[in-house]
Amino acid sequence: MSYLALEQVTKRYANGFQAVKRFDLSVRQGAFVVFLGPSGCGKTTTLRMIAGLEEVSGGAISLAGRRIETLRPADRDIAFVFQFFALYPHLTVRENMEFPLRAQGMRGAEIATRVDETARMLGIAPLLTRKPGTLSGGDAQRVSLARAMVRRPKAFLMDEPLGQCDLHLRESLRDEIKRLHVGIGATTVYVTHDQAEALSLADVVVLMKDGDIQQVASPQDIYHRPANLFAAHFIGSPGMALIDGTVTSASPLRIDGVIAGAPLALTTPTTAVAGQDVVVGLRPEDIEIAPEVASGDRFAVGSVSLREHLGAFDLIDIDLGSSGAAAPTGTALVDARRILKCRTAPNAFAGATRVAFRVRDGRGVLFDRVTGKAV
Amino acid sequence: MAALAITGLTRRFGAVQALAGIDLRAGDGELVAVLGPTGAGKTTTLRAIAGLDRPDAGAIHLGGEDITHHDPARRDVAMVFQNFSLYPHLTVGENLAFPLRAPWRRIADDQIAARVERAARILHIEPMLTRKPTMLSGGQMQRVAIGRAIVREPRLFLMDEPLTNLDAKLREELRVELKSIQRELKATTIYVTHDPIEAMALADRLVVLDHGRVLQDDTPDRVYASPAHRRVGELLGAPPMNFLAARVEGGQVRLLADAAAAWPCAAPAGEVVVGLRPEDLRVASDGAISARCEIVEFFGADVVVGLRIGDERVRIVVDERADLRPGTPCRLTAKAAAVHVFAMDGRRIASAS
């Protein structure tokens, strides 16, 4: 049953530019939905249309069974969280939380009950008499969330709330939002350009590009089964390596042109057929590395072109060499340099200039080179 | 390019001791990453090197020459900022040439053209030379800003979080590119960041700064493997190192939150803090530490699990197959070699062994 629904929602500006194109989405009550994409993809515009800060050019938005796209922002019963820490320094925590309720015209006894309940839920009841300046960073975060929640809106909208925070604060805030959502289950739409933030927070990721939805999926699905080349490239850190190839045999699955001089052997399920031009998508952890001598059994050998020590693990770049084939690349996302990034334990194969590698069982995704869609 | 040596750099702003005696060296062609939180003194250090701010004490030598009191223009140092300010009315090519056109530089036009062309090639922005900055994406604009530093062929590059304002995806791509450009130019570079992955990936040497002091200065691998201070373990790690109250007694270090968790340790008896990296705490059915799972965060290749050991919160990194659900108990283990022991004031005492 859909709680928040967008049907054919479109944003067209006076100059004809379409920021959002026929956006369809159905969100169940209590879901945490993340709009993800690069700058200019339309994610913030869509969020602002839900909030009523931006008019729709076409389409319908409904929340809890009520059409809202023509209502004033204040009448939509939605809380829009711009960023955290915006607490009034001269008011106590209790007064900070009372503020949005007074603005709504709520009365004294009811206000006190509502504040006490919310404070208890977030574990900040002991802080109610304190001033924001005396709170730790984490407590200040909880209070600012509490102030957004105290109104009990039908939905929370958050526009890159962690954007301006530095890395460690961002991590702890992200944790806090996640814990809170697990605790109270409020329907939330959250906008970010950071795929890690999206994967870790979302029940549902809505990946966008140029005003179009690219994929709507759970974090696990969008990571393991990207619907197209853009999703494969955008999700993951780094994204999938995307290499051109041609299927020579569908069963067992063999692909020519990926590795110089040898077919690439995969065991992933696919509908690709022999002769089909494809793009092979491989994640750094899909590759198993072994000493150069480990030949046979699907292993191929490649040269190491770069090694990055990132602390918990290393990334090793394997140069796949010239494919020999002069096949034109299907899209700009395909790596013309033909580099395979592989993840290894710290300092594994230190000093090796050549290593053996193979794709782990069931890993790797194939895309049709013409349509760019997963096959 | 030239080597940089800073000694005893000190700067106070009113009551705030921004720099409390910083020593920092960068060899010719070396990239030194300076990692620290907001307010650590990173930008103050860069501004002192650039000559945009005067230190209260200390000396700055570049290529063997004392430049502490030189005018900024005479230092031959190029800075790249977080906010890539380009001239909007000039084309990309004109923006690149601009720093070279200063009359006192007396650079011939054909020389300027050659330098602009070279920078554009290195940065893959040749097709954009005739465009205006407003037609560029954020990543392209930052490339142009870096190009403006490159054309000057300075003795030293100073980079102040140049990737911070870019989309996460672009940041990653440009990080790899920046490293190969720096290698190609053999550019002595001081690179300021608060991002541990960026610091690890880019640095030949890593300096960790906090409250105006250098906490550690070593290769990134060695800083990661044996942090000299608990703040280093916290700052260099994503997620950061976990810290747990513990006690050393009878040649063992034992967690206060779970007395069953103990490792051999040569440190003197007393209260300590144990540091454990998220990837070094492993789930094992026969593990000595009992924990309760609170939160599971999926990041693709990694899953970060928030757990409670007694009253203390820790985070561990597991792979996706680990079956942990919020609210369920589990057991953890850590090898002695992965246990870092810090004194109550934060200094490293020892590894358990």
Image (tube, rainbow, N blue to C red):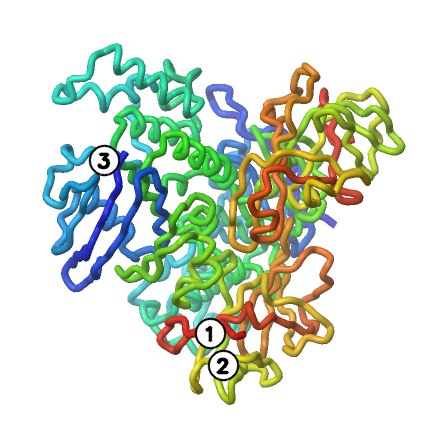
Residue B211, above or below B43 = below
On screen, A135 above or below A238?
A: below
Q: Disc 2 vs disc 1: Cβ atoms closer than 8 Å?
A: yes
Which residue is depicted at the point 45% across and 76% down?
Answer: B273
| Front-lying residue, B32 or B120 | B32
Residue B83 coordinates in the image, percent (x, y)? 33, 37
Question: What number is the disc on residue B341?
Answer: 1
Apparent side of residue B151 relative to residue B297 in the rendered image (left or right): left
Q: Chain of mark 1?
A: B
Q: Residue A133: x, y in percent?
A: 31, 68
User: Residue B77 shows which numbered tag?
Assistant: 3
- Residue at 53 percent across and 34 percent down: it is A42
N-terminal of the pair, mark 2 or mark 1, is 2
**In the image, farthest residue toward the top:** B110
Q: Is residue B55 left or right of residue B185?
A: left
Residue A35 shows in this picture: no
Instruction: Kindly report the distance in space between the C-alpha atoms of the residues bearing marks 2 and 1.
Output: 9 Å
Gap between marks 3 and 2 measured at Cα: 48 Å
- Packing grade of label 2 (10 A; few <14, some 14-19, many >=20) is many
Q: Nearer the viewer, mark 2 or mark 1?
A: 1
Q: Which residue is outermost to the bottom?
A: B250
Query: For the residue labelled by badge 1, is the local secondary structure a helix, a strand or a loop?
Result: strand
Q: Which percent across, then down, holds residue A22?
A: 63, 30
Mark 2, residue position: B246
Helix or strand or loop: what does disc 3 sit on? Answer: strand
Output the chain of dot 2. Answer: B
Give amino acid for label 1.
Answer: Val
Give how far apart the Cα atoms at labels 1 and 3 are: 41 Å
Write the residue at 54% across / 74% down: B353
**Type of amino acid at the residue the image marks with label 2:** Ala
Q: Are marks 2 and 1 in one subunit?
A: yes
